[in-house]
Image (cartoon, rainbow, N blue to C red):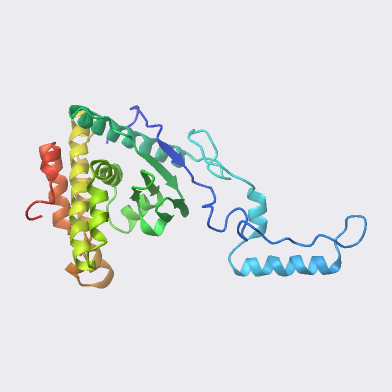
Amino acid sequence: MEWKGRRQSDNIEDRRGQSSGGGLGGNPFGRSGIQIPMGGRRGGGLSIGTIIFLVVIYFVLKMMGIDMLQVLGEGNVSGGSGYEQQVGSRPATPADDEMTAFVRTVLAETETTWSTIFKQSGETYPEPTLVLFDGTTRSACGQASSATGPFYCPSDRKVYLDTAFFRQLAQQFDAAGDFAQAYVIAHEVGHHVQNLTGVLPEFNRQRQAMGEREANKMSVRVELQADCYAGLWAKSADKEGILSDGDLEEALNAAQQIGDDTLQKRSQGYVVPDAFNHGTSAQRMKWFKRGYESGNVSACDTFSGDI
């Protein structure tokens, strides 16, 4: 993927190295905290009782997995957008810089693609924000964690991405490659487009009256449309000369490896079709290819007919 040297998006919120606000960073006791008694002998020293109390608190926290020495050493941290910054309390590494630049570039390319498409209809494309985090963070849709994988929150119009997922994609799911990573980002941006066009709000409205089986079936159609939108973006990127040999194969392999049937076979040895909520490997590959081959939004109607 020929992405270096291209425009990079400013719509990045880098929270890596920060406390989630609801986790164990910063004040591990919550907003109100616990007032540790600091009285004792006159002259500012600590009493024996206070020292014992502090030691007990330290070891209790240690048993909970909280190292107060590390917490106190880290102090307050804040994220930013510059590549030269420190990520949290650790110096930014070349890997951090490269990953940030890559994500910024892919996001910028999706902005160009969808701005052009919206403009053709006489509309303006409101660009989403992409939040980079590690471990856990907060979203308007609730707590986000690396365990949930990348996702889009329609309430705050933000894509949430723990870049550790890219390592998982390569190591656990056998889907390595920069264009496989770009496909993931483009898929989540596809959900943003669905939010703007009313697809997600309507799905969320209808889901309230659906049983789990029906909701899963509708969810599959929503996800496959996002795959089609990712393919549509890939077509636009190809026209811009960004794609390299093997890039499409990387994206299609990623779509195959994260299909519901493939994931279920890998994790439990058998498949439960009624539990599918993203689509089979064949379906995900089919709709990504449809978006790429057509380059047309109208070809991504997953809500009419068979999928």
Q: Is residue 214 above or below residue 77?
A: below
**Residue shown at 32%/59% (left/top)?**
172
Look at the image and tell me whether residue 278 can be seen.
no
Q: Quadrant of residue 108?
A: top left
Write the residue at 88% across / 58% down.
Answer: 45
Can I make out residue 185 in this image? Answer: yes
Spot occupied by residue 35 in the image (x, y as percentages of width and height): 73, 60
How many circles with numbers are drawn on the protein?
0
Residue 49, percent from left and from top: 83, 69
Viewer-closest of 16 and 176: 16
Query: Picture coordinates of residue 48 (x, y %)?
Result: 85, 68
Q: Where is residue 189, by image quadrant?
A: top left
Q: Quadrant of residue 90?
A: top right
- The furthest residue to the left: 305
Q: Where 305 sits versus 86, above or below?
A: below
Quick check: 109 left or right of 45?
Answer: left
Quadrant in which the C terminus is drawn: bottom left
Is 191 placed left or right of 284 in the picture?
A: right
> Residue 98: x, y in percent?
41, 38
Residue plotted at (18% across, 30% down): 121
In the displayed structure image, the side of residue 228 where residue 151 appears, left or right? right
